Image (spheres, helix red, strand yellow):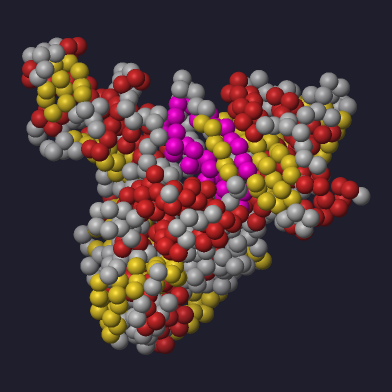
Amino acid sequence: MRFTLTVNGARREVDVPRRTTLLSVLRDDLGLTGTRYGCGTGQCGACFVLADGRAVASCFMPVDQAADREITTVEGLADGDRLHPVQEAFIAEDAMQCGYCTSGMLISAAALLARTPRPAAQEIRDALAPNLCRCGVYGRAIRAVQRAAE
Amino acid sequence: MTLHGDRLERRIRIGPDGAVTAFSGKIEFGQGIRTAFTQLVADELDVPIERVHVILGDTGQVPFDHGTFGSHSVEQESPRLRRAAAFARRQLLERASAKLGVPVERLDTDAGHVVAGDARRLAYHELIDGRPLEGDIPPEIAFLPRERYRYLGRPMPRVEARDIVTGQATYVADIRLPEMLRGAIVRPPVRGAKVRSVDDAAARRVAGVVAVVRDGDLVGVVAARDDQARAAADAVEVDWEVGPPDPGPDVDIPLRDDPTTEPALAASAVRRSVTYVLPSIANAPIGPSAAVADVREDGTTIYGATHRPFGLREGVAKRLGLAPERVRFISQMSSGTYGRSSSFEVAVEAAVLSKHSGKPVLVQWTRAEEFAFSPSRPECVLEIAAGIDGAGRINAWRYDEHTNVHTARWFDPKNAGGTHGRNAIPPYDIPHVSVVLHMEPTPLRTANFRSLAASENVFAIESFMDELAMASRQEPLAFRLAHTSDPRLRAVLERVATASGWGRPAPSRTDRRGLGIACTVYHGTYVAQVAEVEVASSGAVRLVAMWAVVDPGAVLNPEGVRNQIEGGIQQSASWTILEELRHRDGRVAASSWDSYPIATFRDAPERILVIVAGDATKDSTGVGEPGAVPTAAAIANAVFAACGARVRDLPLSPERVRKAMAASTS
């Protein structure tokens, strides 16, 4: 089936089976592999994208539900060469190890800062709690979000 | 004799544009070695760091390497790369000397150029000019003086950082090749099951299916899209013959056997004997196993992630019936896997499916497959008996470690002490010691996990050190210091005590807050930690803060060291407080993050303070694992200090802690 999506500000046409997930469309049809598969059930946050500004699990969202929303992936956070403040801050705080979960964390952080520009530490923890990290960079990521908020 | 990798042309190349490429068989899993190696080559070769590119784990390009384990990468590989860079620099100076007619002693280097006293400058690439640097790297070669280094010893962001935050980094499952298809495997009910027959009629009717493959006892599906491959794999009917799994070795291995231990134990003034129990835990990488295979007549290429690039090449070649030279393995960026990808079955699966479909195939496991079919960290039962003499010193120590295989590679009793029994021998001065490793069978598939058995052994040893201190009415830090004359171990213990305010007046018992200390010497790296915990009336343990002091010898990248130690602590806190992989008859009960919870942002301690107190005169040692090693004991000792509950079984679940609290007050 044909679907028209708005991804990172551009209209994109895809022809995929109806039940295909947004995650698969992004990765397999649109070449946007920065959004990652982690669990397929929305439990780990690795596949998070912004849908109308809210962080959602793209592994759990069928493509037809994504069709009438503005989707932003990690590739769309920067404005050309100018990184988003959360991207700058994650680099500055070295808030990554393997980096596999980083895309999802950046999406959650960007969504948080858009609605709460000066979040308290507990608000950061709550907003990023859906993003699992096994390497253990939680402390650095909290500092990075605080830095991005300044 | 020249060992593999000791030829300069296999280690460092300088391109016509002055770009420097360095080669290593080690691999990057987020531990930051690419950054450390880049710093090292840039400094020793005296080139700007932006010009250095490090290729890791590509068997078509890098010298042979056994694998990336045991936090050895920096310790083993940095001297080799440093010698290679120094040798390259020397050759460049010699070439410049010939070209300029100036003796080498009157030449120097500066940011990718050889410079003469008369201000003449030659860029390195002008000295290559079609004649690559080559030759046997000498075992002894002069290095640049330390004050010339511009990058080593300074905090550096990861070289991959920008690609990671912009989503441009290519992880294994991000590889896209022309005509690439997706594979899914039909899983047996238990490992080692044999295929009796396959009915693939329904699977072949699924949209997008290209092939249903049976190759030996491997059954899989190749399709255009991942969900199609999964749906078809679910539709394949296999009649499995389930046999008993290989339970692994059953053997006792003495690691230290002082014949005087038993009489000394019997003669001790105070004796204690206890048992500690650790469950199996899952490596639980956030990114499940993945590989891309492209099997062709003219050669096979595998894109993946493993701790053993050359082991994988051999394993895939053997399964396909090819000579290893016909297979090239190219390491990709990978989710951290903490030892799990020492086993590389996913690459074999992708290779078999590619071979039969004649197309490149990507296989990525589901979360459920990752939990159910990955090897896990084994269970451990640790029995310790010790005796203390009239002067309050430990006189005798008997230790029995009961566990299963900790490595993916074939069991070898000769190196068992360094793997399955790692850190079983206490780092303390004790006159009479016996340590026996009991390798026991298990139906569960077990293999490498961060630090192998060291985390388990150090949990027992360091918990017991606290128990012995209590039993002989001594202060835990002073008790440890009284049992070691190693200046580096003493230094990290004393420094972490100062940093954490160790010995500060304990808050009232009603607060149930407490500090606990633990330490380790892990493959040459010294770590001491103090944990502060809070215990709720429910028994729930919260790690409030952690202080750690680490001495990894000469420090390459202090920020990288801090990040690794912090991560080790955070991960190990998760193991200690939350994690237990339940299984029955070899079948894992976990299938999702619901059934195997790990620490989240909400569980992160308020702070983890890492002090890097390296000794610049010592060789550099690793930091990827040691941060995780003393954490469990530091937390368990803090729980005791907080509420009097001595918990010897992990995880420190609320039920266990509550029960131990009740027992301590009764």
The residue lying at 32 percent from left, 50 percent from top is B162
| Image height of B653 relative to B130, above or below | below
Q: Nearer the viewer, residue B155 or B648?
A: B155
Using the image as rendered, state which of residue B284 and residue B313 is in the foreground: B284
Against B234, is B467 above or below? above
At x 62%, y 21%, the residue is B486
B25 vs B438, nearest the viewer: B25
Name which residue lies at 40% across and 87% down.
Answer: B201
Give the quarter of the figure containing the N terminus of chain B. Answer: top left
- Image quadrant in which you'd find residue B139: top left
> Residue B395 lies in magenta, yes or no?
no
Q: Nearer the viewer, residue B507 or B143?
A: B507
Residue B572 in sight: no
The location of residue B119, given as percent across then percent down, is 11, 17
Left or right: B120 as drawn, with respect to B362: left
Furthest residue to the right?
A: B666
Which range is magenta?
A: B545-574
Q: What is the x, y in percent for residue A17? A: 34, 84
